[in-house]
Amino acid sequence: METIKIIIGKTKDLYSAYAENARGIYAGGDTVEEVKQSVSNAIRLLKEHNTGENIPGILKGDYQIIYHFDTQSFLNYYNKVFTNVALERITGINQKLLHHYATGLKKPREPQRKKIENALHKLGSELLSLEL
């Protein structure tokens, strides 16, 4: 199965997205949900209105979509799920610095981005192993 990687970024006014590895897939919206719907629409329209040779090969077979957020977009999108207090607890990064990342005042270096990503993946793994 192929993977289409969608890059999501936050501009001043909205979220925008594009496929990193499939030409012709672009999207935008006021929310991430709108962007995801716009991505689905872009793929559908690309397949419906193009001939076989104009459709990226990745769309001709089975594929999955993954969404890649920049840190600012992630923190803004999930701010109702993860408070800075909670993120500080799982990442070890102080709240003030997380706030700077969320507002775009500062951009995290690669080790900080990885620290956030790894902490979230660890939390996800723990949650997947739970039964209630």
Image: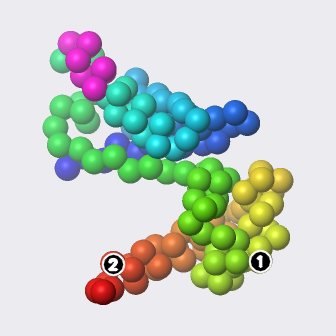
Dot 2: few (<14), some (14–19), or many (≥20) neighbours within 10 Å? few
| Left or right side of 59 for 90 | right
The quadrant holding residue 119 is: bottom right
- Identify residue for label 1: 94
Q: Which residues, given as a range, are shown in magenta?
A: 44-51
**N-term mark: 1 or 2:** 1
Q: Looking at the picture, which amino acid does disc 2 mark?
A: Leu
Up/down of 96 relative to 25, above or below: below
In this view, the residue in front, 17 or 12, is 12
Q: Quadrant of the C terminus?
A: bottom left
Up/down of 55 relative to 60, above or below: above
Q: Residue at x 49, y 51 (%)?
A: 68
Up/down of 35 relative to 97, above or below: above
| Left or right side of 18 for 47 | left
Label ID, residue 43: none
Residue 77 percent location from the top left of the image: 59, 53
- Identify residue for label 2: 128
Residue 68 appears in the picture as rendered: yes
Q: Looking at the picture, which amino acid does disc 1 mark?
A: Asn
